Each structure stands twice: as C-alpha cells, then as structure tokens.
C-alpha cells in the first residue's frame, strides 16, 4: 500500500467474550474463555457438546420487531457491530460525509444457514407453499452487508467475500485496496457469522476438526499445545471502519491504526488440509510485507490463525519460522481463538481488531491453555497471561478451507 | 386459540403481528400497501399466515384481490362459512 496505508477509524464487535469492543478486549486481556457447554437439548446425539456463543443477545431497539423477524441471525450480529463501529468512527447518522463514497464489505463463511434449514423444514413438513417469501433474501450471504447499508444509508461499494475462515481478512484487505484505488473514501468492513447449528457441528465434527474436550469447555481451545484436538466453534461479528488517511485526518477522526499491508494466496493443494509444501501461508505473509514495504524485523506481534487443530497450528508455526528467520525468537505470538473459539468468516476481522488494540494499548492478549507447548510449534508464545510490549507493527493471519490464505499488517496509529 | 374471539378480531391481531402496525390502524378500509406499509413480499407472507391460522387455501388469483382489511375479512367469511 502507498505511503502510510489506510486508516482504521472505527471498531465494533459482538463476540463470545462480550457485547462490544471494550468488554471483549477486557476479557481477552484478562485471559477469559468464552467457551461453554451447550444445552442438553442442542443436538443430543452430537459428539461435540461445547461451543462459544455470544454471552448475551445483541439489543437492537432501533430496528422494528417486524424487520428483525426477517433477518437471519448473521444480519442481527452485523447490525450490532456496525452501529458500534460507525459511532466509534464519529460517523453517526448526523455526521457530514459523502454516503455515496462509503461502502460496506461484510464477509461470511457459511451464510444464512439457519434460515435455509428453517425453510427446508417447512418445505418438507408442509410443502412448497409454506416456504417463506423472505427465505431467499434472508439466507443470502451478502445480506448482512445489504442490511447494514440500508440501516445506515451507506451507498458505496457493497460486497461480501465468502472465503471460509479467511473471509473477513479478505474483506478488510480488499476494502483497503478499493479505497487505495479511489473507489470509496471509507469502507465498513469485516465479517459476521452465526453458524452454531446442529448440522454445522455435525459436519465439522465428522471432519475431526472440533475439540471433544466436552468436560472442560474453557480448556478445550488450546492452540499450539500438545493436547490440542480441534477447534471450538464460535459466533459473532467484527467490523472496522477503514478510511483514506487524508479523509480521516481532514475530518479530525481518531486513528486507531493503519492497515499497511495485505497479502493473499492459495495453497492449491487440498480442499481442507493445510500444506507446508505449497508455502501458501508463507507466500501470503511475504506478500503482505512486500505490500507494506516492511521487513520481517519490523513486525512486533503476531496474532496467529492457530485454531487448535493438530495439523493447522504446526503448519502455521513452521511458516512463521520460515518467513521471520532469526527474528522469530523475539517475535511474540498469540492465538486469541483460545478464548473466542473460531468465528469462521468473522475470525479474521476480530483478530485484526485484537491486533490493532494490542498495538494501541501496548498489551498483547494471551494464548490460553498453553500448558505443554508442542515442540513443532516452538515460538515466543504469549502463554497464559497478557504481556506488555510496545509493538509498532502487528501481523494477523487467516487461513481457510479451499486452501485460502490472507495476511494483514497493521501499524500503530496516532493515539 | 380462543374460539371466543371473532374472525375479525383474530384477523386484526394477525395483521398487527405480521406488519408491526397498531391495532387502531387496522380498520376495514385500510389498504395493506397504501396504509399499512406492506410490500409484495409482506402480502405473500400475510396470505400464507392467514392460510395457516384459519386452515384454508387462498389461491394466488384470489389473493391478488385481497387489498384491504375489509376484503380479507370478506374472503375469510366466505371461505370459513362455506366450509
């Protein structure tokens, strides 16, 4: 990216750790887990009994009850995060900005699956005449972006990146690129995911992708640890306001950080398994460094993708060692998925948010449950407790099924 | 569902619930689109809910003619009394 990069002027989220940025960040720094045991009635036959749902439902008093009924849960989560991010950026309804040049990109991994399932049920039980006329628009993966644009009258580019667990990192990177090429002044970008559903749990469980540590929910997500046995499914939304730096400065906006570099690549190796041979992770991190005009030694914190799966975490650790060389010894790494679980299409944006909060506050959030680090994942782990560190640049990694990879580099802002 | 309530009361409550309007707006002459803010999808859903609630079938060509609360009530009376 040219010069300083794209400014991040607003943050918003609803996560398994809290209903907003402040509570989520507080919990992350305190090292609190959002993983809980699911009610017995939730898919009683499922082998996995744990997940990371929101601790409380978002409150959307500004949306009419009638409209809420016609929204998939993913849209509701996106609306809550969008309201916070825009307010944080000083872009409330009364603010003076060019709405035609303000866009939205809200990614999703899975889309409106709960809506699809509900209507499929109606179809099977009561026939085609009972399928809701709102089924199709409600279920579309891009409807969070669509409804957020309607709610806030944002008339610029409106997009939805659907690239599995890298989706919201792609949304951020591609939105920054849109701003750089002049297609928008600002983009509300990130992801929303509401996929804690029995069918989804069954599918991931049968891939052997989910942790089955049902009796110790808070200890189940343990990235980089020898005992790791899969990820924990989370839900939520995280959105960032990305803005052309000159635009942000001209209106006196507070700049949390700058998005300096973005890299994307494909493994082109396997539909679901990570691959060290294809160097997909390595190539996307290197592309981000090149984009930022930064060297490996400039990076002072890594928020890893590490989901707590046996294969994924070791491939990422090895990729980091190969990119950073000797600097890896002094490069703190943590995986906040140890606390939030895996938010799939919203994970990249939430971890981008954590990365830039780490830069802004000088506090690195920890990796929980890292009691016996896997020698294959040897890194400078921020294990167990948050660490004070004055990093200037942070790397946030996101990888997904389909062999998709994204890397984002943030640089500390003015505050 | 209470059988004490008249057909009209049940219809009005259904419209209030579906369209998020207040009960005093739901008068016989009120048009679903003009007065109650319904769009084409709302009307499809409303007709579907009427079918379910009153256990009747409203073919599409008949549904098109139901444009006001009064018309809906007449339609329901016809269907239910002839059943």
Image (cartoon, rainbow, N blue to C red):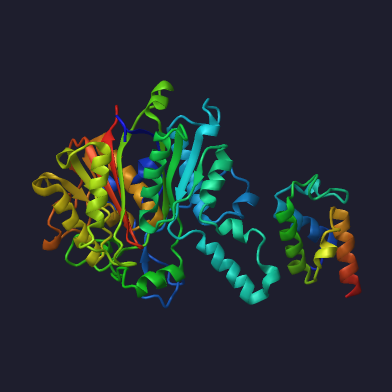
Residue drawn at (84%, 64%), measured in percent from left and top? B61
Q: Quadrant of the N terminus of chain A?
A: top left
Residue drawn at (22%, 67%), measured in percent from left and top? A310
Residue drawn at (61%, 61%), measured in percent from left and top? A135
A285 relative to A293, above or below: below
Place of residue A264 in the rendered image (x, y in percent of width and height, measured from the top left): 32, 50
Place of residue A79 in the rendered image (x, y in percent of width and height, measured from the top left): 51, 45
Q: Is residue B28 left or right of residue A237?
A: right
Total number of numbered discs in the rendering: 0
Place of residue A165 in the rendered image (x, y in percent of width and height, measured from the top left): 36, 57
Residue B36 appears in view: yes
Between residues A274 and A362, which one lies in front from this camera angle?
A274
Between residues A297 and B26, which one lies in front from this camera angle?
A297
A68 relative to B78, above or below: above
Place of residue A376 in the rendered image (x, y in percent of width and height, measured from the top left): 13, 62
A297 relative to B73, above or below: above
Residue drawn at (36%, 72%), measured in percent from left and top? A205
Residue A372 appears in view: no
A4 relative to A41, above or below: above
Q: Quadrant of the C terminus of chain A?
A: top left
Q: Is residue A401 left or right of residue A363?
A: right
Q: Among all residues in the image, which is located at the extreme bottom?
A: A45
């Amino acid at each position: 990216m040219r010069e300083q990069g794209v400014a991040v002027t607003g943050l918003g989220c609803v996560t398994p750790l809290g209903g907003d940025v402040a509570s989520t960040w507080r919990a992350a720094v305190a090292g609190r887990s959002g993983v809980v045991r699911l009610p017995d009635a939730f898919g009683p036959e499922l082998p996995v009994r744990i997940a990371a749902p929101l601790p409380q439902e978002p409150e959307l008093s500004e949306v009419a009850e009638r409209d809420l009924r016609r929204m998939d849960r993913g849209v509701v989560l996106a609306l809550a995060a969008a309201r916070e991010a825009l307010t944080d950026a000083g872009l409330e309804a009364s603010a003076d900005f060019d709405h035609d040049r303000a866009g939205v990109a809200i990614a999703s991994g899975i889309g409106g699956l709960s809506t699809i399932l509900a209507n499929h049920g109606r179809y099977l039980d009561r026939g085609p005449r009972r399928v809701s006329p709102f089924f199709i628009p409600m279920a579309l993966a891009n409807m969070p972006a669509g409804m957020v644009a309607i709610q806030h009258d944002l008339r610029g580019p409106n997009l939805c990146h659907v690239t599995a667990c890298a989706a919201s990192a792609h949304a951020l990177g591609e939105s920054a690129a849109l701003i750089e090429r002049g297609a928008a002044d600002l983009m509300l970008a990130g992801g929303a995911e509401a996929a804690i559903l029995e069918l989804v749990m069954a599918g991931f469980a049968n891939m052997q992708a989910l942790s089955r540590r049902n009796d110790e929910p808070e200890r189940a997500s343990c990235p980089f640890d020898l005992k790791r046995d899969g990820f924990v499914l989370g839900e939520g939304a995280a959105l960032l306001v990305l803005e052309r730096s000159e635009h942000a400065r001209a209106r006196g906006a507070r700049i949390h950080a700058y998005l300096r570099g973005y890299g994307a690549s494909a493994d082109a190796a396997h539909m679901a398994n990570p691959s060290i041979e294809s160097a997909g992770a390595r190539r996307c991190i290197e592309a981000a460094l090149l984009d930022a005009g930064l060297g490996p030694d400039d990076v002072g914190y890594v928020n890893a993708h590490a989901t707590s799966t046996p294969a994924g975490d070791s491939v990422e650790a090895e990729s980091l060692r190969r990119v950073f060389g000797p600097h890896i010894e002094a490069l703190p790494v943590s995986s906040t998925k140890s606390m939030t679980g895996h938010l799939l299409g919203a994970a990249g944006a939430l971890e981008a948010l954590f990365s830039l909060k780490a830069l802004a506050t000088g506090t690195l959030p920890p990796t929980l449950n890292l009691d016996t680090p896997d020698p294959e994942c040897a890194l400078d782990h921020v294990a167990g407790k948050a660490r004070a560190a004055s990093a200037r640049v942070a790397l946030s990694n996101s990888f997904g099924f389909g062999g998709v990879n994204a890397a984002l580099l943030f640089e500390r802002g003015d505050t | 569902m209470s059988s004490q309530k008249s057909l009209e009361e049940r219809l009005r409550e259904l419209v209030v619930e579906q369209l998020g309007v207040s009960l005093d707006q739901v008068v016989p002459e009120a048009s679903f689109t003009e007065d109650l803010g319904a769009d084409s999808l709302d009307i499809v859903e409303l007709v579907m809910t009427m079918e379910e609630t009153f256990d009747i079938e409203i073919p599409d060509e008949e549904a098109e003619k139901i444009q006001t609360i009064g018309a809906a009530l007449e339609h329901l009376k016809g269907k239910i009394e002839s059943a």
